[in-house]
Amino acid sequence: MFPELNNLLNTTPDRAEQGKLTLLCDAKTDGSFLVHHFLSFYLKANCKVCFVALIQSFSHYNIVGQKLGVSLTAARECGQLVFLEGLKSSVDVFFRAQAAPHPLQFLREADAGNLQPLYEFVREALKPVGDGQAAWRCPVLLVDDLSVLLSLGLGAVAVLDFVHYCRVAVCWERKGNIVALVHDSGDAEDEENDILLNGLSHQSHLILRAEGLATGFCRDVHGQLRVLWRTPSQPAAQRDRSLTYQYKIQDKSVSFFAKGMSPAVL
Amino acid sequence: MESVLALGGFVLLRDSVEWEGRSLLKALIKKSALCGEQVHILGCEVSEDEFREGFDSSINSRLIYHDLFRDPLNWSQTGEALPGGPLGALQAMCRRTHPGPVTIALDSLSWLLLHIPCTALCQALGALSRQHAHPGGGSPAEPVRVLGLFHEELHGPGPLGALSSLAQTEVTLSGTMGQASAHILSRRPRQRPAHQTQWFSILPDFSLDLQGGPPLESQPHADPHTAPVDPTAHVTFNLHLSKKEREAKDSLTLPFQFSSEKQQALLRAGPSQATSHIFYEPDAYDDLDQEDPDDDLDV
């Protein structure tokens, strides 16, 4: 996790809020550093994490996680981390007969499928354990990422329904958190992605939006992060609802600074 | 804002990601409940606990929450889901026969539009307002109010136009500098639509605090995360003047400023002034013609 980002969000692993949906989105840049941040953050916060990783392999996240101070292998072995490796297990859908529906069963279906098997997988993974095992703090669902589900043939409403049911099971029933990454293509013609992004934005408590600089690529400033706090049903109190910072990604950390205040240009 | 509830009929509440509308919806529900009405809520997006949060027990006792949040598509197969799915739940609201003024809140219309066809939703909305206009038996029409929350960015102009044409009142939320405003468009029968912009804020107990106008330009409070940085702190040139330099600068007369002293000095041209001489050494190629070239001009 990145300590500077924790400061921006005014949170630490000990004081993590519960029952929240955090939406990560990126536009014209790669926002996966936010996924790595939240993965290591919640593992350090002693939460049980279910990570639906559809984009990269386990070893990729493990390598980055080690730089950030967590070992995914150890977490998986002791039961703290349930890892669905989409790249590897999607092959099983086609080449191995499954007794129960596979979480990614929709890949086999010809017509518009739904994500109920994936939801059942998540619910099972984050089920509270019986006595005798280590009690984790709140359960956390992490998804990297949801936009790829649209590319795999699902409709935006199917993905929204999946997130809806996960919110019921994780945020409401178990007072856990959900963190999901959605790409913002910025393309006016991608209506499905816009519906997905806007639909999730309305349900989120916190939106972190990583954007590329409007002026193009820069060696010292990799992008801009906009933080928007929302309370979907409570009246907004007087507080900082929105912050904008620029950032630079380094090998093991990310440094944040106010706009125009990069150490390289001062 | 009083007109929103006074008019009755269908009220369309349009919100956006930046300016959420659920708190205004709850504020309007609280107002209706305080008037003694019963309020039915079809909740699709938030849980019942989260929706009831902030209301005191007297208000909560008047709210009936139809929970479409927990299992809208019957994935759990436990039999707890509302029968008929989203459309069935909406139609069940239409068939309510409880007498007395009633408010129906749909949270949200956007969720319903994503799951049932727009035509079915519009027909249901029409049936909701029609049913109470003509209850059986010749008794006077019971006022019914339908409040629908609508997330603008999720839908194209078609559904928005359809719902907008059904609405007696349309409230669009926006704001500036942390202060929310509502643009209210009311359509009364046989009258021109009336526009009104109302600045407001919602208190933690969901009462409406109406403000007179937009917020005054206030000093942006200091960002707690970054100390104010002085941009003149590390420049390589001198931006400041010392006292002597400032005095010298103030007492300097500009060359083209024509003051009375300068005028006198020019006019005097006395022997105290140094006269100027011009020394001219002609070259071999110079044409020294003593004639005045302007002699032939008749001026």
Image: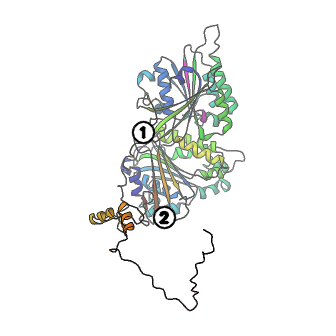
| Callout 1 secondary element | loop
Q: Is residue A97 visible?
A: no
Foreground pick, A209 / A121: A209
Give the number of marks: 2
Tell me the residue at 72%/45% (across/down): A111
Q: Please name the amino acid that badge 2 sits on.
A: Ile
How far from the left and from the top, in percent, is residue A1?
42, 57
| Quarter occupied by the C terminus of chain A | bottom left
| Callout 2 secondary element | helix
How far from the left and from the top, in percent, is residue B244?
27, 66
| Mark 1 nearby-residue class (10 Å; few <14, some 14–19, many ≥20) | few
Image vertical order of residue B218 relative to residue A6, above or below: above
Dot in front, 2 or 1: 1
Image vertical order of residue B34 relative to residue B109, above or below: above
How far from the left and from the top, in percent, is residue A229?
46, 44
Q: Residue furthest bottom?
A: B284
Image vertical order of residue A52 relative to residue B41, above or below: below
Foreground pick, A3 / A57: A3
Query: Mark 1 — residue?
Result: B216
Numbered mark located on residue A63 in the image: 2
Foreground pick, B254 / B27: B254
Q: Is residue A134 visible?
A: yes
- The residues colored magenta run B102-110
Q: Please name the amino acid that badge 1 sits on.
A: Leu
Q: Is residue A260 left or right of residue B160?
A: left
Q: Is residue B196 left or right of residue A192?
A: left
Q: Is residue B109 magenta?
A: yes
